[in-house]
Amino acid sequence: MNIFPLALMSLITFLPESPRFYIYHDREEDASKALKTIYGDDYEDKLDELKESSKNEPDGISYTDMLTPGHDQFHPTVLTVMAQVNQALTGYGAVSVCKLCLIQLYTSQSQTC
């Protein structure tokens, strides 16, 4: 069960950054290399599209934007918090982690898992 996270953690240093990350940090040459790897020779249109969309993005989102009513990020933040609280209150997390043990416990009369 812990093999996938461990493998991901060991391989994460080899994963390339996204072209969007490169554009956001003014590394256009690296972005074009990444897009060329993804799209081949037809990457220039995607690069132009990515540069244009990065100009329309806000500079950053602060905690004030997420926690103050009236900002664009407040509603998604409240929904996320409500979903997490709902999951904690219903016990879904515990059941999803222990479901095989619970099934074995209730179906085979075994006292241990």
Image: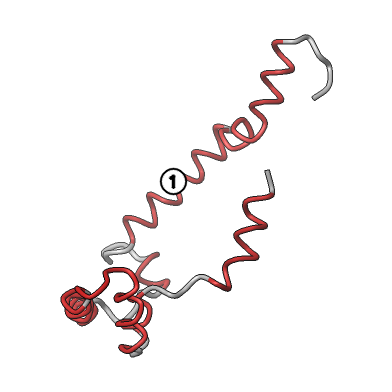
Left/right placement of residue 107 relative to residue 39 reads right
Q: Residue at x 39, y 57 (%)?
A: 77
Q: Residue at x 37, y 85 (%)?
A: 30
Residue 51 x, y percent position in the rendering = 21, 81
Is 62 above or below relative to 85? Answer: below
Number of marks:
1
Q: Residue at x 49, y 39 (%)?
A: 86
Residue at mark 1? 82
Left/right placement of residue 55 relative to residue 82 reads left
Is 105 above or below relative to 6? Answer: above
Q: In the rendered image, which quarter is residue 44 located in? A: bottom left
Q: Nearer the viewer, residue 67 or 60?
A: 60
Q: Residue furthest right?
A: 111
Left/right placement of residue 7 relative to residue 57 reads right
Left/right placement of residue 77 relative to residue 4 reads left
Is 36 above or below relative to 9? Answer: below
Say which quadrant the N terminus sits in.
top right
Q: In the rendered image, which quarter is residue 25 located in? A: bottom left
Chosen colour scheme: secondary structure
Residue 2 x, y percent position in the rendering = 69, 48
Disc 1 marks a residue whose amino acid type is: Met
Q: Residues within 10 Å of mark 1 (few under 14, many from 20)?
A: few
